[in-house]
Structures are given as C-alpha cells and as structure tokens.
Image (cartoon, rainbow, N blue to C red):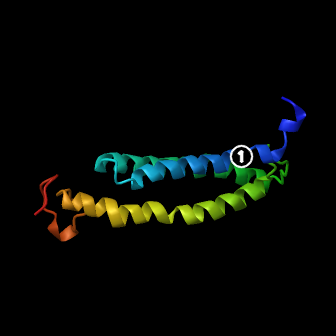
Amino acid sequence: MKKEFMKPEYFENRELSWLGFDERILGEARDKGNRLFERLKFLSITSSNLDEFFMVRVASLKDMVNAEYSKKDFSGMTPQQQLDAIHDRVHHFLSCPYSSWHRSLLPELLQCGVQLIVEYEKLNEEPGRYV
C-alpha cells in the first residue's frame, strides 16, 4: 500500500468500529418498521455482542495497558486511548437498549399478551403454569 494512504486518519479503530456495528444493530431493534420479534432478536444480538466485546476485546486492551504496552494501532490510538474512547462511547450507548426494552418492546409484548415477568406469589407448584 502506498505510504500516503497509511496515515492514521484514514483508519477507524477496530474496537470503535465494532461498537458502531452494534449501534447499527440496536437501530434495527429500535426501528418500529420491523416486526416485534425481529426487534427482540436485534436487541438480544446487541446484548450478546456487547458481552463478547467486553470479555474479549476490552479484556485484551486492559491486559495491554497492565503490561505497559503503548504501541499505537493503525488509527493512531494507544490501548489506553482506546479504553478511554470505548468508555465514553459505551456510557452513552448503554442507556439505549434499556430504554428500548422498557419503553417500547416490553409494553408491546404485554399488549400482545406475552407475559415475561411473574411475581413469586403468582407462581404455583405446577411447572410452566402460574395462577
């Protein structure tokens, strides 16, 4: 690749790119043009991806910081800078899935007759049934 195309400003950080992908998936969960159960699947994919992201990618960056590794990636960010950027982005991002669940998806499910939350007092001894 030509040297002039190797500048950090031409590259997006791979961790932030992953979060951008998750944000797009969450957008599908929030899109009322999609069917309800499709929106639920998108929300669960977002959650699963974020779990994996923290278990693998963020853990790896933390290991690098603890090992005092400070080499910059192609986008010009050190591991600590990446962690800082991830923190800022995820802090804002996390309110959206919870808001979508509580304000939109759960009420729509309840309106369709789907019951997900059962109080302990309403349970009986027969598996799969509640009073």
Comparing 97 with 34, the one in front is 34
Label total for image: 1
Q: Quadrant of residue 110?
A: bottom left
| Residue at point 87%, 30% (across, down) | 2
Residue in front for this viewpoint, 1 or 127: 1
Residue 72 visible in this rendered orientation of the protein: yes
Q: Residue furthest top?
A: 1
Position in image of residue 47 (x %, y %): 47, 52
Residue for point 83% across, 48% down: 72
Quadrant of residue 65 within the rendered picture: bottom right
Q: Name which residue type carries label 1.
A: Glu
Report the residue at 35% width, 66% height from top: 102
Give the position of the C terminus as an image quadrant.
bottom left
Residue pushed farthest bottom?
121
> In the displayed structure, does residue 106 sit left or right of residue 80?
left
Q: Residues within 10 Å of mark 1 (few under 14, many from 20)?
A: some
Q: Secondary structure at mark 1?
A: loop
**Relative height, residue 100 to residue 23 (above, below):** below
20 and 59: which is toward the camera: 20
Q: Is residue 3 above or below residue 20?
A: above
Horizontal and vertical percent for residue 62? Answer: 71, 54
Q: Is residue 51 visible?
A: no
Identify the residue at the far right of this view.
Answer: 3
Q: Position of residue 119 (x, y in %)?
A: 22, 68
Residue 83 lies, in percent from the top left, at 70, 58
Q: Is residue 85 above or below residue 7?
A: below
The N terminus sits in image quarter: top right
Name the residue carrying label 1: 12
